[in-house]
Image (cartoon, rainbow, N blue to C red):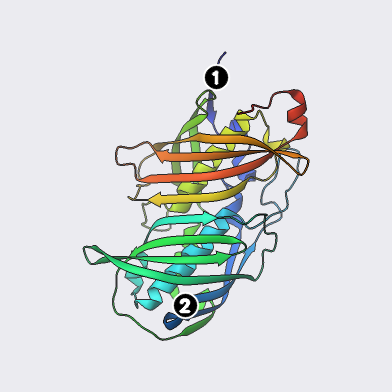
């Protein structure tokens, strides 16, 4: 039995990149931050966040548009912006130092069900610790609670001085151009994700591809892929792999539910060249819940490089359509 499949691009499996969330749709979501209150003495930040989705955020081949919910990418944008703001205030960072903040690690645990409230979402952040890493750099750890998600994030940064002064911003724009610019550039709309030379091994339940992230125009001198860039590409790979394992076409699929995500970005990956990135299923099982059939799968993702700069672990669930189950094509493992 032939278990290997080769595709020229990932669009052959998932469809037009301009109509998919992880390739294009998430870039059109507007993220708003309001009523931001920082209290260094209480080690906490509170704020209201919103994710404004366009009507065509994710369109299937038959024209179906799914109901949006707070996504893992929304959560990454929320915590990256607000935790960066928190660290920059506590340690009184300059604009250049804000630009040098490095997000090294993030762990996300989702709630028990999707959150469909997309506006004025409460976020509560606690500053946990700071430790010196050497070379006059420091690691700070923050915990966050938002929309049923629990998130822990580790930032590497400089220190100028330390303040205990409370501060309030009515919106993120009031926090200064460096922070506002940082939040804007987290999701660059002019980036295009090309995933090509797709190789799937159904026997080992793995997928590898060449990743090339290019810009339609040059708007900055930043030649480093962000965690969001790499995670969005890995998400497409995981989506394609789980669809092929279960013989599902995207037009028949339901929303993917990322139950837990761990990302460690140890070394910057340059945008000046393409690279090979691989995902594989380390463990999976079929569950019957509320008269529906689900696959729960644990994924690993790595950049194929001796330095192993990026590692991603995701526990993902998706509902297997009854139409697929009834054909007998579902792979049970």
Residue 94 rendering spot, x and y as whole percentages: 33, 75
Q: Residue at x 62, y 63 (%)?
A: 147
| Left or right for 170, reference 67 | left
Q: Which residue is mark 2?
A: 175
Q: Residue at x 47, y 55 (%)?
A: 107
- 47 above or below 28? below
Looking at the rendered image, the quarter that the N terminus falls into is top right
Q: Which mark is residue 3?
A: 1
| Left or right for 115, reference 64 | left
Residue 102 rendering spot, x and y as whole percentages: 36, 60
Q: Residue at x 37, y 36 (%)?
A: 304
Q: SS for tag 2? A: helix
Q: Which numbered disc flags the more N-terminal residue, 2 or 1?
A: 1
Q: SS for tag 1? A: loop
Residue 261 rendering spot, x and y as whole percentages: 51, 50
Residue 182 rendering spot, x and y as whole percentages: 44, 65
Mark 2 vs mark 1, CA separation in Å: 54 Å
Can residue 167 be seen here? The reply is yes
| Left or right for 139, reference 173 | left
């Amino acid at each position: 039995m032939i278990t290997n499949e080769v595709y020229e691009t990932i669009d052959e499996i998932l469809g037009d990149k301009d109509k998919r969330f992880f390739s294009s749709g998430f870039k059109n979501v507007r993220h708003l931050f309001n009523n931001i209150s920082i209290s260094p003495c209480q080690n906490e930040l509170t704020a209201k966040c919103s994710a404004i989705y366009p009507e065509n955020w994710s369109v299937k081949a038959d024209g179906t548009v799914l109901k949006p919910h707070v996504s893992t990418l929304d959560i990454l944008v929320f915590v990256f912006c607000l935790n960066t703001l928190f660290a920059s205030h506590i340690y009184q960072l300059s604009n250049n130092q804000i630009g040098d903040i490095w997000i090294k690690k993030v762990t996300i645990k989702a709630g028990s069900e999707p959150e469909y409230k997309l506006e004025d979402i409460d976020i509560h952040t606690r500053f946990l610790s700071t430790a010196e890493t050497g070379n006059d750099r420091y690691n700070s750890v923050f915990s966050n609670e938002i929309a049923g998600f629990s998130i822990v994030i580790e930032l590497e940064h400089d220190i100028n001085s330390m303040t205990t002064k409370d501060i309030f911003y009515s919106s993120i724009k009031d926090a200064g151009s460096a922070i506002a610019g940082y939040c804007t550039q987290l999701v660059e709309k002019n980036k295009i994700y090309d995933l090509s030379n797709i190789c799937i091994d159904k026997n080992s339940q793995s997928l590898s591809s060449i990743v090339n992230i290019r810009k339609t125009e040059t708007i900055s001198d930043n030649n480093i892929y962000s965690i969001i860039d790499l995670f969005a590409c890995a998400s497409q790979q995981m989506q394609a792999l789980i669809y092929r394992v279960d013989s599902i076409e995207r037009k028949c699929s339901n929303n993917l539910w990322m139950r837990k995500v761990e990302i460690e970005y140890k070394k910057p990956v340059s945008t000046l060249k393409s690279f090979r990135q691989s995902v594989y299923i380390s463990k999976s099982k079929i569950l019957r819940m509320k008269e529906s059939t689900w696959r729960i799968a644990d994924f690993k993702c790595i950049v194929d490089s001796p330095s192993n700069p990026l590692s991603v672990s995701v526990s993902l669930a998706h509902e297997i359509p009854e139409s697929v189950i009834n054909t007998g094509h579902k792979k049970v493992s």
